[in-house]
Amino acid sequence: MGSLAIGSYLFHFHSLISIAIMFSAAVWLSILSVASASHPPHPTAAPQYSGHSQNSWINYTAVPGFFLQDDAATTPSTFDYFEKYVDSLNKNASHNVNYKVLFMGRHGEGYHNAAETFYGTPACYYSILDGNATVTWADAHLDPAGISQAQKAAAYWASRLTLQKIPAPQSYYTSPLYRCLQTSNITFSTLSLPKSRPFKPTIKELFREGISGHTCDRRSNKTFIHESFPTYKFEKGFVETDPLWEALHGETSGDQDIRSKKVLDEVFGSDDNTWLSITSHSGEIASILRVLHHRVFSLTTGAIIPVLVKAETIRSTPTSTSYLPCLKSDKCTFKANNWKVDDYFNMHESASKHGDFLIDRCEVMKDNIQIIER
């Protein structure tokens, strides 16, 4: 049985595998994709969204495998073997199946993370503000700790590319939120990458964090993003102002999964490359893992999880769109313009259509929180 270890992850080729690592500070930490002895989940028709094909859909599975402890015996030749192995999967796959390795990384710590630590999660009134007298956390930038995390990630990538010949990503994607744009730039822009695999990231709207009323999840306008990161490419149809964020609106986890599947379909349907980097958020990466039928776990800031994904196009009619009811949020105190509100967000199951997914709508009034049902 062949095996491969890189830093703190070990690959086995006894069966097809799922790769999982966590990258925090300057080391790969022990995180797993726990393998099941059973077969991958039986495909069930995917939720249908606007623009979904009427006669086919893509089923995603994280290829089953298991995690092993660190093995210092890794050599460049063993990773070269794994790269060839993945190539052979695609070469021998049927016409409706393809495999990709996704390096999904969470952004470094941002000022919104620091604000939550400072104020405390229950005091979530701060999350609807743009900032305080000291810092701004609307479309939060990386704080010094987050910049350091991204720099350490870059140093580790550099060492793995040189010492263990880990394949560099062929394509790079990022959330449009500033903390992800910063993280991807600091992590990859200074690496000595192969000329055939340059760092030219594409900004995709739907790789953003779960949509909430928090101002940290409201993106900047397109012009500002371009001025800040002029070498980044916008996906087709990327509009000037944020089309999805509205104060005190939030999507359910079910709606987020529909959104995550849509963006995966876009990537898998248009990108022929195998090794892909996605810089995103803890909530969005968790959603993607659910879509991939992968075990879900939380990533710390600056962490990375790679997954070997099998995508199979199935010729059948997808089911109609469905969504999960919202859960009640924690009790929250809002303070703005000399008024405050104490109430629970009573998230009703009734929801309004917004874009391609369903969201509950709430509106803050001066003396109460009113739920708008439509």
Image (spheres, rainbow, N blue to C red):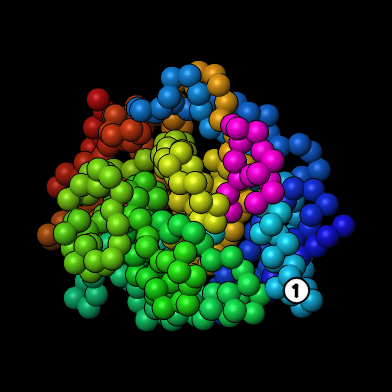
At x 43% / y 59%, what residue is drawn? 172
* Quadrant occupied by the C terminus: top left
What's the residue type where badge 1 is placed? Answer: Thr
Q: Nearer the viewer, residue 138 or 347?
A: 138
Residue holding disc 1: 74
Q: Position of residue 40 (x, y in %)?
A: 71, 37
Q: Secondary structure at mark 1?
A: loop
Q: Position of residue 182 (x, y in %)?
A: 34, 70
Q: Position of residue 341 (x, y in %)?
A: 23, 51
Vertical placement of residue 325 versus 300, above or below = above
Q: Nearer the viewer, residue 362 or 236?
A: 236
315 drawn magenta: no
At x 45% / y 51%, what residue is drawn? 284
Vertical placement of residue 142 versus 335, above or below = below
Vertical placement of residue 72 versus 41, above or below = below
96 drawn magenta: yes
Q: Which residues are magenta?
A: 87-102
Disc 1 packing (10 Å; few <14; some 14–19; many ≥20) = some
Residue 186 showing in the rendered view: yes
Residue 104 showing in the rendered view: no
At x 19% / y 67%, what residue is drawn? 227
Examine the image and state in which quarter residue 168 appears: bottom right
At x 12% / y 59%, what residue is drawn? 337
Examine the image and state in which quarter residue 112 appears: bottom left
The residue at the far right in this view is 1
* Quadrant occupied by the N terminus: bottom right
Task: Count the numbered circles shown.
Answer: 1
Q: Nearer the viewer, residue 51 or 355?
A: 51
